[in-house]
Image (spheres, rainbow, N blue to C red):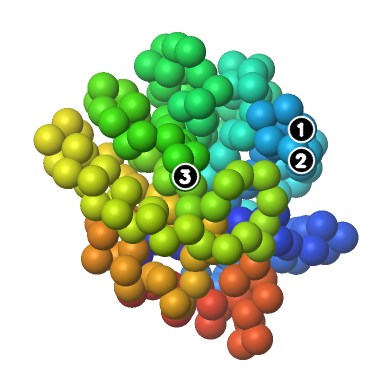
Amino acid sequence: MLVAPSILSADFGNLARDVEAICQGGCDYVHVDVMDGHFVPNMTIGPVVVEAVAKAATKPLDIHLMVEDNNFFIDLFAPLKPEFISFHIESEKHANRVANKIRELGIRPAVVLNPHTPIESVEYLLEYVDMVLLMSVNPGFGGQKFIPSVVERAVRLKDLILRRNPQCLIEVDGGVSDQNIQELKKAGVDVVVAGSYVYKHPQGVAAAIESLKV
């Protein structure tokens, strides 16, 4: 299992320290949540802060856009050369065009589904993306409770992926911990995002990351 700790749960007063901690602790990606206050009822960080994160990180960035104007934010963050930029299917009328734009910028495109968005909505987009991110909470805030139905959704998505684009990864974000990681692994999930679990783990971030690498 690949692990992408979310810096949404980091101490922003010591952001470089907390980014370095997860990189040294064995993470595979640094997950960056970008919220615009419109698509979700919260606002997070812009390019100045993400640039600081990129400088502190020794692992690739995984940027998750929770925004209404995807093209605007893609243009903002593309110069930082993250590994992935993911956008919500619910916010985009021209999803394959956006996925192609991300790839043309030398970045791997990913698409995100909210907990109640039908899996089938991305069936014909799978050939254009390298990853599908399934939200296991409603996006907008950290520390929310895991929605168990994401396991069944991952199984159904895996079936579509095997038929449409077997190289496509499945990522799950929200409420991930050592209590549900085995279920997610069995369902075919490749990458997990964890914020509160990693940064608030009593034994430290390295132990938290290790417990998710099943």
Q: CA distance from mark 1 to mark 3?
A: 19 Å
From the top left corner, tell me how far across and down residue 171 is, in percent: 40, 50
Which mark is first along the chain, 2 or 1?
1
Counting other residues with Cα less than 10 Å from the Cα at mark 2, is it few (<14), some (14-19), or many (20 or more)?
some
Nearer to us: label 2 or label 3: 3
The reply to whether the C-beta atoms of the residues labelled 1 and 2 are less than 8 Å apart is yes
SS at mark 2?
loop
Residue nearest the viewer, comparing 203 with 104: 203
Which mark is first along the chain, 3 or 1?
1
SS at mark 1?
loop
Residue nearest the viewer, comparing 152 with 14: 152
From the top left corner, tell me how far across and down residue 76 is, in percent: 68, 24
The reply to whether the C-beta atoms of the residues labelled 1 and 3 are less than 8 Å apart is no
**Could you tell whether 27 is left or right of 183 in the image?**
right
Q: Which residue is mark 2?
A: 42
Nearer to us: label 1 or label 3: 3
Give above or below for 3 relative to 128.
Answer: below
At 45% from the left edge and 40% from the top edge, which residue is drawn? 116
Q: Which residue is mark 1?
A: 37
Q: CA distance from mark 2 to mark 3?
A: 18 Å
Q: Tell me if I can see residue 4 in this picture.
A: no
Give above or below for 16 relative to 89.
Answer: below
Which mark is first along the chain, 3 or 2?
2
Amino acid type shown at disc 3: Pro
Q: Which quarter of the figure has residue 211?
A: bottom left
Give above or below for 93 relative to 29.
Answer: above
Q: Which residue is mark 3?
A: 115
